[in-house]
Image: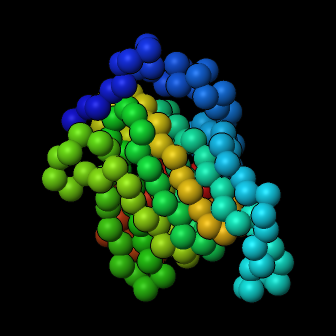
Amino acid sequence: MSDRATRGGLDTAEAWIARLDLQPLPFEGGFFRQSVCSEERSPVAREGGSRPLHTAIYYLITPRSFSTMHRLPSDEVFHFYAGDRVRMLQLSAEGAGRILHLGNDGAPGVEPQVLVPRGTWQGSELVPGGRFALLGTTMAPGFELADFEPGHAAELIAAHPQFEELLRRLCKS
């Protein structure tokens, strides 16, 4: 179940936070640092404005932090780098939902890379017993804070009652 990076002493959340200079991500949870932000801008027809052509971040979660339910207007690709498996909940506007697992241990049903289609509600947590997970995300057009739409437990549970228990853990409000 575990896939811990032990080279160079990077086997704890604290070591990765220090190594990558990660900062708390208050609106979503976890720790992050933007690693790439394109200087080139791309027009975004849905808003009449522009966004960076692409962005990428490092993102780390612990047993006490998680990625709260939210959705974004662009596709987001998650990449698993180190640590323990992550459980991700994805909910579509049509009412469908699925649970995916991210990791790099090669186990069936555990993927090192996952796509979150635009407009999909998403949230992630460590699997029980996990110590940390270091992930990355890539978006094109790139992420800007105005893109982040937080999910609310009552509304998401009403639309997806089959995921109530998980939604209660993954929503801040």
Q: Is residue 145 visible?
A: no
Query: In this view, which residue lies farthest toward the top?
Result: 9
Q: Is residue 42 visible?
A: yes
Residue in view at x 21 percent, y 56 percent: 109
- Quadrant of image for the C terminus: bottom right
Query: In this view, which residue lies farthest toward the left?
Result: 108
Residue in view at x 32 percent, y 61 percent: 99
How many numbered marks does the figure carry? Answer: 0
Residue in view at x 43 percent, y 65 percent: 115
Q: Which x, y percent locates residue 105?
A: 23, 40
Q: Nearer the viewer, residue 127 or 74?
A: 74
Q: Which x, y percent locates residue 146?
A: 77, 64
Q: Which x, y percent locates residue 142?
A: 68, 63
Q: Which x, y percent locates residue 18?
A: 61, 21
Q: Is residue 42 left or right of residue 68?
A: right
Measured along the vertical axis of the image, is residue 74 above or below residue 106?
A: below
Query: In this view, which residue lies farthest toward the front?
Result: 40
